[in-house]
Image (spheres, rainbow, N blue to C red):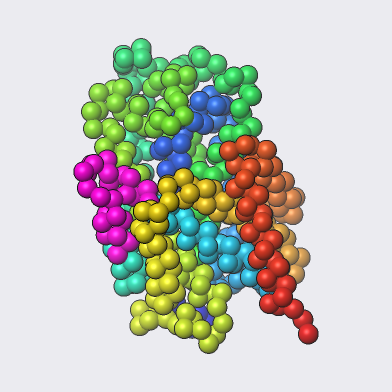
């Protein structure tokens, strides 16, 4: 059934939205980047993820409250336009759109790298092109097919994490001896609770935060979700449980099976653990998991950029049209063509160029999250919470200010960290340039 106000088809079920929300909280940051976080923080990384997770949950509750107040809006950026003004909506909307386009380009490049693991003698571009075409059709045939694809992409990640947690429990309960010694729960804290006297602890907050990047994606699905007043709150409320189970559970298991001092940056702790207990195909299995994570990111990017472009353009634009399946196909076509340039650009520029641009997009997302919390403040002031349908951000507006302060801290950490200083400044410059454009575009007569 189509929504009379938006024209979008409400075919995403609670099962789809729940897994989409889950997929947004679990990325390659856990499977590949956790080694660096553990190395810098030690077991204290668990506390870092819990604190970060609580602020992410607060942000999602604010987003959820906005979504249930008006489920006819195609994308959550529309709320920013309504409560922060046209100029802010323009800047944040186009930043969000280009951010997802860039992420899709980097993930497409990553897919070539992952496939190269199994086919080292083959060129990578045919694999990139094949994934691009398949995921394009997934997004343009039917919304339900997109939802089903994301469901199984998320399921693969869940199976890998649950396998890690169960492995840790079995080994610890059985006091199984491995090449690293006898596995026991005390391994988690017996080598110290904080790495290097806490010198690198602060920097791990930005690592933990960016592990959750994309969690807001559920906010793009609201206009195409069955029973959004029930489905969106349930999906948002379950996020904190997922953080505790999947992140805290997996990281704890990793540091129980082997001492946290064994893990290094640049090496997947999942591969190291499974290889250490005799799973010879561990690297291949994790390579498959991160391959599906990359495909999931591209899939989400096509969905998001299509809806974003549809929302940003004028009523007379060719991109403001839906096909017979209530999908903004023209908007997805443009996004796909731009993302497809990654196949060509890979011949001309090194991967580091994509990494630089991707980091800039990630920093820009941080500014969008801040704007989301400000939008919620404006919404509460305008409606006095009367349109929240009983689903509200707890302790608002105090929780708003606290979350904004936390996001500001992450931004400052990015600025003072040499590896991310340039990209953070570039993200800020991008926002300034768009603000100048918006000033003239919406200049009042």
Q: Residue at x 31, y 44 (%)?
A: 114
Taking the view exactly as shown, the residue that stands out farthest to the right is 445
The answer to whether 67 appears left or right of 251 in the picture is right
Q: Residue at x 73, y 65 (%)?
A: 378
Measuring from the top left, give residue 196's x and y in whole percent: 59, 19
Give the position of the N terminus as an image quadrant. Answer: bottom left
Taking the view exactly as shown, the residue that stands out farthest to the front is 348
Measuring from the top left, give residue 401's x and y in whole percent: 74, 50
Q: Residue at x 63, y 70 (%)?
A: 90
Q: Is residue 439 something one can see in this rendering? A: yes
How many numbered badges does the structure rendering display? 0
Q: Is residue 219 above or below residue 361?
A: below
Which stretch did the figure color magenta? 109-133
- Asked if residue 125 is among those painted magenta in the image, a careful observer would answer yes
Q: Residue at x 37, y 63 (%)?
A: 340
Q: Is residue 155 above or below residue 176?
A: below
Give the position of the C terminus as an image quadrant. Answer: bottom right
- Asked if residue 386 is among those painted magenta in the image, a careful observer would answer no
Q: Is residue 71 above or below residue 390?
A: below
The answer to whether 315 appears left or right of 430 in the picture is left
């Amino acid at each position: 059934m189509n929504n009379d106000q938006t024209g979008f088809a409400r075919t995403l079920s609670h099962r789809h939205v729940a897994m989409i929300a889950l997929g947004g909280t679990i990325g390659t940051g856990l499977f590949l980047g956790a080694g660096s976080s553990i190395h810098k923080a030690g077991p204290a990384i668990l506390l870092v993820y819990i604190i970060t997770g609580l602020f992410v949950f607060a942000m999602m509750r604010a987003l959820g409250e906005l979504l249930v107040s008006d489920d006819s809006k195609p994308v959550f950026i529309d709320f920013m336009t309504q409560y922060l003004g046209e100029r802010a909506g323009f800047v944040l909307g186009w930043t969000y759109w280009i951010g997802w386009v860039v992420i899709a380009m980097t993930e497409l490049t990553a897919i070539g790298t992952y496939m190269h693991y199994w086919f080292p003698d083959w060129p990578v571009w045919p694999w990139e092109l094949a994934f691009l075409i398949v995921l394009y059709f997934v997004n343009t045939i039917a919304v339900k097919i997109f939802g089903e694809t994301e469901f199984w992409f998320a399921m693969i990640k869940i199976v890998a994490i649950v396998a890690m947690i169960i492995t840790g429990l079995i080994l610890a309960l059985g006091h199984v001896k491995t090449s690293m010694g006898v596995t026991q729960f005390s391994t988690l804290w017996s080598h110290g609770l904080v790495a290097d006297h806490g010198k690198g602890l602060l920097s791990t907050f930005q690592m933990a935060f960016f592990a959750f990047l994309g969690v807001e994606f559920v906010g793009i699905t609201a206009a195409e979700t069955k029973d959004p007043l029930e489905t969106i709150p349930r999906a948002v409320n379950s996020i904190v449980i997922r953080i505790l189970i999947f992140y805290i559970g997996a990281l704890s298991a990793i540091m129980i099976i082997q001492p946290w001092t064994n893990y290094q940056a640049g090496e997947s702790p999942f591969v190291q653990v499974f290889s250490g207990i005799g799973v010879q195909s561990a690297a291949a299995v994790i390579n498959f998991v991160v391959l599906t994570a990359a495909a999931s990111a591209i899939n989400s990017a096509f969905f998001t950029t299509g809806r974003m472009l549809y929302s940003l353009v004028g009523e007379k634009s060719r991109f403001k049209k839906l096909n017979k399946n209530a999908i903004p196909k023209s908007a997805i076509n443009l996004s796909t063509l731009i993302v497809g340039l990654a196949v060509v650009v890979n011949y001309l520029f090194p991967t580091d160029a994509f990494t630089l641009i991707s980091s800039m997009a990630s920093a820009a997302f941080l500014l969008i999250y801040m704007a989301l919390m400000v939008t919620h403040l404006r919404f509460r002031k305008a409606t006095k919470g009367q349109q929240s349908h009983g689903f509200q951000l707890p302790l608002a507006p105090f929780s708003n200010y606290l979350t904004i302060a936390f996001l500001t801290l992450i931004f400052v950490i990015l600025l003072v960290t040499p590896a991310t200083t340039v990209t953070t400044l570039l993200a800020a410059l991008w926002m300034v340039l768009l603000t100048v454009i918006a000033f003239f575009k919406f200049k009042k007569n």
